Amino acid sequence: MRHSTNIINKKMFMGIFDSILIKYGALMIGYGVVGLPVFGPGSEAYIKSIGDDPSKITRDYVRNSSLLINLAKAIGRLVISYKEIQQLAGYTTLVYEMHEVLTDL
């Protein structure tokens, strides 16, 4: 009984961790990447190319942010589908082992 409780607690922790990673991890990394043109090492060239116009910087930021949100959603779907494929592989293994046992009978 104690072992089952331990496994359930670990699954719950991993589920929470995956959810947080999916929601916030991709967004934090993405906003860092979106800010690189303005605050990164090549910021002088970017500012020079757009002419120091705040509206152009804002337009680029908003466009990149919307792309970033879609990217974060796609990464979340990939992580969830990976977990589902792992679960399906486990069921497939169980069915194969049961088939082998029934064949031996």
Image: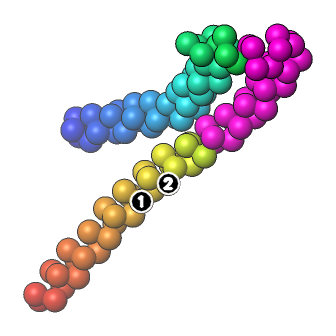
- Say whether residue 30 is magenta: no
Cβ–Cβ below 8 Å for labels 2 and 1? yes
- 36 sits to left or right of 87: right
- Residue lying at 27% horizontally and 34% vertically, measured from the top left: 6
Pointer 2: residues within 10 angstroms few (<14), some, or many (20+)? few
Query: Where does the image place residue 105, in percent across and percent down from the top left?
Result: 11, 89
- 32 sits to left or right of 60: left
In the image, residue 51 above or below residue 86:
above
For mark 2, give the secondary structure: helix
Q: Which mark is residue 43?
A: none
Query: Where does the image place residue 41, in percent across and percent down from the top left?
Result: 55, 13
Q: Quadrant of residue 24?
A: top right
Query: Where does the image place residue 19, in percent across and percent down from the top left?
Result: 52, 34
Observer able to see residue 89 = yes
Q: Nearer the viewer, residue 12 or 35?
A: 35
| Disc 2: which residue | 81
Q: Quadrant of residue 89?
A: bottom left
Image quadrant in which the N terminus is located: top left
Residues rendered magenta in the picture: 47-73
Q: Amino acid at mark 2?
A: Ser
- Residue lying at 35% horizontally and 33% vertically, measured from the top left: 9
Q: Amino acid at mark 1?
A: Ile
In the image, residue 82 above or below residue 44:
below
Q: Nearer the viewer, residue 45 or 31?
A: 45
| Disc 1: which residue | 85
For mark 1, give the secondary structure: helix
